[in-house]
Amino acid sequence: MGLDELRKKIDDIDDEIAELFCRRMKTVAAVAEWKRQNNAAVYSGSREDDILSRVSAACGDELASYARVLFSTMFELSRSYQESALPHEGSKLFKLIESAERCGALPENASVACQGTEGAYSQQACLKLFPSPDITFFQSFEDVFRAVDSGECQYGLLPIENSSAGSVISVYNLMNRYNFYIVQGVRLKIDHCLLAPDGVAHGDIREVVSHEQALAQCSGFLRKNPQIKVTVFENTATAAKYVAESGRRDIAAIAAPICSQLYGLNVLAEKLQDSDHNFTRFICISKTLGIYPGANKITFIATLPHSPGALYGLISKFAHRGINISKIESRPIPGKDFEFIFYFDVEAPIDDKTVQGILIQLENEGRLTFLGGYPEKS
């Protein structure tokens, strides 16, 4: 049999598969209606396991694994189709999104919690979002979460990711401990300087202090100067203030250029970072969900079973609909061996009904913690 004949045979089989698929999905719709009337859950793990065992046995050893992939994908499509046919009004997430205040802009004089001290990059990010904020500085990232959680501050600014040094792990570790929503995002260009007291030369420096992210972003400079001791501080501006107040003649800070003016330090080197394309993403958090114009990024936490294909199954929900997942961050679950929760950033409008359907499906499966739908300012 020639190639053209084989292809024609495959085309005929594909037509049969398409017809059977349509019949199956129509039956799935009838199942969804029955479940709606009887208030039954869409997902039935035992039912899917039984089918996978049956079709694997029917296909034989050679094709069993392929059959499992095919039918697992079909199950995902079936669940999605059922979810789309069911009303969303009963979903907690649907009610949350529908009832959220549609805001025009962030308030001009809002009280905002930032980590560090005056001159911190969080302060600069804050000023990109709020015209005249009332900023309160806190020592740690957890203090920022606490200030928002307690109502001491209406908003909080937190760094979440750097284009060179990656995720701010300490913030991710805290995100699952507090109740909050992300209402805005902002990207800030980061330029680091080497700052030292007046009269201190580059060759005098024996110690550099800064935040661990800034140190990672300036790793090239540190490698070239192995004689310099590196000390981690909780914030770049706090490090600069310490250098100014230390009275030492052998110490410098890696911090923002503005800190030289604030703390009377000299700039020994500019643009110390490894890459000139050095940006940090910040999130603005609030105790209550507000949806602002241009909310086209969604962040959520998913708890997945420790089993093969669990992460693939979640990703495929978005991939099948052409929705881009721009970031996945995994963090270990305390007290469990090698089990993880996953943070997702998805590029999609919060009012998109298709995306809401996926999130509601995850909610119904008990896997979702919704963190917000928000715009991100460049």
Image (spheres, rainbow, N blue to C red):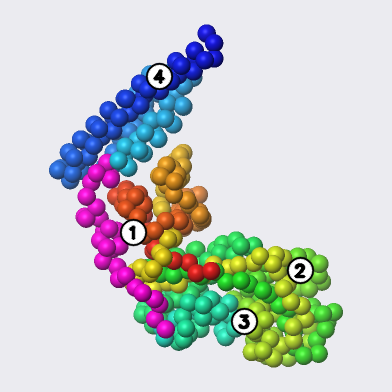
* Mark whose residue sits in front, 2 or 1: 1
Q: Are marks 1 and 4 in contact (CB under 8 Å)?
A: no
The CA span between labels 4 and 2 is 63 Å
If you read the primary sequence from the N terminus, does the residue marked by circle 2 or circle 3 appear first?
2
If you read the primary sequence from the N terminus, does the residue marked by circle 1 or circle 4 appear first?
4
Disc 1 is placed on an element classified as loop
Q: Which residue is mark 3?
A: 237
- Amino acid under label 1? Asp
- Kindly identify the residue that appears in the image at 77 percent across and 90 percent down: 198
- Decide: few, some or many residues near mark 4? Use Cα within 10 Å; few <14, some 14-19, many ≥20: few
Q: Which residue is mark 4?
A: 13
- Amino acid under label 4? Ile
Q: Are marks 4 and 2 in contact (CB under 8 Å)?
A: no
- Kindly identify the residue that appears in the image at 63 percent across and 72 percent down: 190
The CA span between labels 1 and 4 is 39 Å
If you read the primary sequence from the N terminus, does the residue marked by circle 2 or circle 1 appear first?
2
Disc 2 is placed on an element classified as helix
Highlighted range, magenta: 82-108
Q: Which residue is mark 2?
A: 222
The CA span between labels 2 and 1 is 46 Å
Q: Which mark is residue 351?
A: 1
- Kindly identify the residue that appears in the image at 44 percent across and 15 percent down: 9
Residue 69 or residue 247, whichever sits in front: 69
